[in-house]
Image (spheres, rainbow, N blue to C red):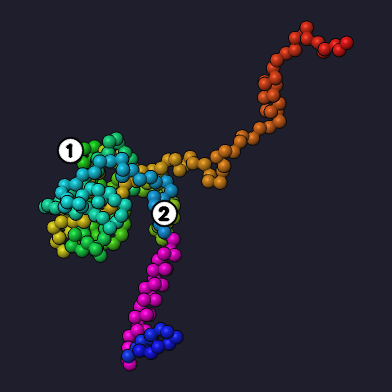
Amino acid sequence: MEATEGWMVARPKHGSTSHLDNAANQWLSALVHRINQQEEEPDVFPPPGLKEISSLASWTVSTAKPGNGVAALRSPDLAHFWQSDGPQPHLLSIHFFKLVSIVHIRLFLDFENDESYTPTKIQFLAGMSVHDIQEFAELSVSEPQGWYEVSFDNVGRVDPEDGSDEEDPRKDVDWSRRPVLRAFLIQVRILENHQNGKDTHLRAVQLFARDDSEIHRRPANEAKTALPVRTAPQLAAKRKQQNNIKTASWMMEPDLR
């Protein structure tokens, strides 16, 4: 130890400098990576033309561990999840109180944290009730990480002029050209997990409909309090309507004496 201006400085032992340099380089690399991730443009969801309707439904699950039920699945925090507690298949039923038109569904899977609880095969069914639901999509994944979209290929044909671009997924999509799934009930069936796991984890499911208000919405730069433009003839006609009192014949100018 060496005293320098009132501070005690510990000199590194011989041979430990390279170890400290490696640790510092790793720390700097992690810091730069974190900064680069923060500087990336965040995905805006839902995109223009969509609105989430998940909150309009009643959610039920076949089984659940205490504290990991529907409330955890519906939480906006992706650290929370639904954990089943029973035999497969594990069912998530989403009941709407009126007939809805769904154009997009996505779910969040996290193999890094869930491991054997992560689904590998999921079926999606829809209908008016549990008595007439039919399968419209199936998702098979391996070690998934992030958001996954449910295919609507069996719902209807996708218009090739919908404006989507596979090379640039952030490009705006014309959702009015996408197939529409009309149903009261959406059911998610988890059939298999990684490593033959028994119970499952599901962190989020979101359903979206078209947002027709976006189509008719005013431009953002247009002032909401803008007054209508009136031409000179319109103003003259309005003044004439306001001053429509005629002068009586007996009314004369006062005569001062």
Residue at (31, 43) in percent of width and height: 55
Specify the amino acid type for callout 1. His
Residue 47 can be seen, yes or no: yes
Looking at the rendered image, the quarter that the N terminus falls into is bottom left
Magenta segment's dominant SS is helix
- Residue count near mark 1 (Cα–Cα under 10 Å), binned few <14, some 14–19, many ≥20: few
Q: Is residue 15 on the magenta stretch?
A: yes
**Magenta segment, which residues?**
14-41
Magenta segment includes 20: yes
Which of the 4 image quarters holds residue 126?
top left
Q: Which residue is mark 2?
A: 44
Residue located farthest toward the left when viewing the structure as drawn: 87
User: What residue do we see at 15% from left, 60% from top?
Assistant: 197
- Do the CB atoms of the residues marked 1 and 2 lie less than 8 Å apart? no
Residue corresponding to mark 1: 131
Kindly identify the amino acid type of the residue bearing the numbered disc 2.
Val
